[in-house]
C-alpha cells in the first residue's frame, strides 16, 4: 500500500476524543469476557482507558498522554461525556517492543489501580482489569532496520495476542522519520500498516502527519537537536493525531494549544485531521 501525502511510568485521568486511523474491521472474538463490553478505536464504542507502551518518543515534553488528556478536555462540550477517559504511560528509554513485558504490565489491580485526581488526591479505581486498550510503539528504527524488522512483527503479534487474551484492544502508534532521513516515512508507514492488518489492530498515523506538516510548513520545527525526538510542536501534533484517529472528533478548533502560537497549533490540528481522513480511505 502506498500513501498520498505532501512531501518513567506516569498516570493521569484524561478525556480523549478523535477519529479512525485504519478502517476498522470486525472486532476479534478472542477478546474480552462476556461481562466486559468490547471497545474498538474509531467506532461509537472507543476505549475508555488506555495504556501507552513505548519509549522516549512518548515521554518527551511531559508525556504524550498528558497532551492527549489536555486536548480531550478542550473538545466541544457535547463530546466530553463520551471522551472522559483514563491513561497510563509505561516507557523505557530507547526501547523496542521486545523490551516490554506486556503480560506483567497487565496484571489485574497493579498498574492503574489508583490515579491522582483533583488537588493531587488519590483515587482508587474499581478492582480488576484497568484498561480497555494498549497503544504500542517500537523503537524509532526497529520496523525498518533489516535485523530488527522481523522482531517488530513478531512482538506486534505477541503483544496483540496478550492484550486480547486479557480483554484489551491492541493499537499501534506509527512513528515518524528522522528530520534528516525523510525516506524513513514510507517504510515506517508500510510496516505499521502491515502490523495492523496482520493483527486486526488500529493504527494511528502520526508519522504520516509529521511528513505532511513538514511538507506544508517546514518552518514549524517538529524535532529537537538530535533530529529524532519531538519538540513541543511535534508532541502536540502526535497528540492531535491520536485524538483524531481513535475517537472520531476533529482536533481543529480545540481550546488546548500546548503553549504554541495559535496559528501553529491550528496548522497542526488541521494536519492531524487531514492525515487521519486520508489514511483511513
Image (tube, rainbow, N blue to C red):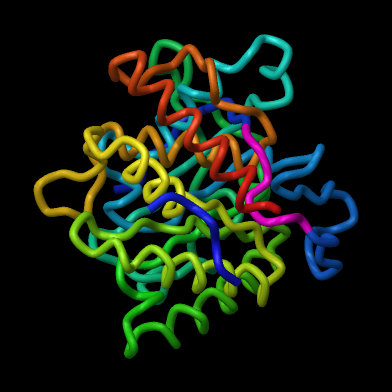
Residue 92: where, in percent of width, then height? 29, 59
Q: Quadrant of residue 83?
A: top right
Residue shown at 64% from the left, 13% from the top: 76
Residue shown at 62% from the left, 34% from the top: 18
Task: Give whichever of 52, 262 is nearer the camera.
Answer: 262
Principal secondary structure, stretch drawn in magenta = loop
Task: Give whichever of 128, 167 is nearer the camera.
Answer: 167
Residue 216: where, in percent of width, then height? 36, 39
Residue shown at 40% from the left, 57% from the top: 175
Residue 273: where, in percent of width, then height? 56, 35
Residue 272: where, in percent of width, then height? 50, 37
Quadrant housing the N terminus: bottom right
Q: Quadrant of residue 96?
A: bottom left
Q: Quadrant of residue 32?
A: bottom right
Q: Is residue 142 magenta?
A: no
In the displayed structure image, the side of residue 198 where residue 254 appears, left or right: left
Q: Is residue 23 magenta?
A: yes
Q: How many marks?
A: 0
Looking at this rendering, what residue extends furthest in the left direction?
225
Residue range highlighted in magenta:
18-24
In the displayed structure image, the side of residue 163 where residue 184 appears, left or right: left
In the displayed structure image, the side of residue 123 where residue 139 appears, left or right: left
Look at the picture and state if 169 lies above or below 197.
above
Residue shown at 48% from the left, 65% from the top: 189
Amino acid at each position: 500500500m502506498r500513501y498520498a501525502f505532501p512531501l518513567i511510568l506516569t498516570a493521569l485521568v484524561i478525556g480523549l476524543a478523535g477519529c479512525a486511523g485504519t478502517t476498522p474491521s470486525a472486532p476479534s472474538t478472542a477478546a474480552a469476557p462476556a461481562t466486559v463490553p468490547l471497545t474498538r478505536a474509531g467506532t461509537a464504542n472507543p476505549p475508555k482507558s488506555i495504556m501507552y507502551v513505548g519509549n522516549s518518543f512518548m515521554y518527551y515534553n511531559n508525556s504524550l498522554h498528558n497532551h492527549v488528556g489536555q486536548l480531550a478536555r478542550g473538545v466541544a462540550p457535547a463530546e466530553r461525556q463520551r471522551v472522559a477517559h483514563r491513561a497510563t504511560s509505561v516507557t523505557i528509554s530507547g526501547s523496542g517492543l521486545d523490551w516490554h513485558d506486556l503480560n506483567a504490565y497487565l496484571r489485574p489491580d497493579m498498574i492503574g489501580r489508583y490515579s491522582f485526581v483533583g488537588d493531587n488526591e488519590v483515587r482508587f479505581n474499581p478492582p480488576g482489569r484497568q484498561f480497555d486498550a494498549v497503544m504500542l510503539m517500537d523503537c524509532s528504527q526497529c520496523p525498518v532496520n533489516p535485523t530488527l524488522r522481523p522482531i517488530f512483527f513478531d512482538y506486534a503479534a505477541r503483544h496483540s495476542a496478550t492484550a486480547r487474551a486479557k480483554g484489551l484492544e491492541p493499537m499501534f502508534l506509527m512513528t515518524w522519520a528522522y528530520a534528516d532521513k525523510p525516506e524513513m516515512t514510507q517504510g515506517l508507514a508500510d510496516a505499521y500498516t502491515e502490523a495492523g492488518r496482520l493483527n486486526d489492530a488500529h493504527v494511528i498515523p502520526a508519522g504520516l502527519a509529521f511528513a505532511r506538516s513538514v511538507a506544508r510548513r517546514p518552518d514549524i520545527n517538529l524535532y529537537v537537536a538530535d533530529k529524532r525526538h519531538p519538540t513541543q510542536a511535534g508532541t502536540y501534533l502526535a497528540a492531535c493525531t491520536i485524538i483524531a484517529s481513535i475517537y472520531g472528533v476533529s482536533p481543529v478548533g480545540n481550546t488546548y494549544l500546548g503553549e504554541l502560537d495559535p496559528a501553529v497549533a491550528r496548522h497542526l490540528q488541521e494536519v492531524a485531521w487531514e492525515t487521519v481522513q486520508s489514511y483511513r480511505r
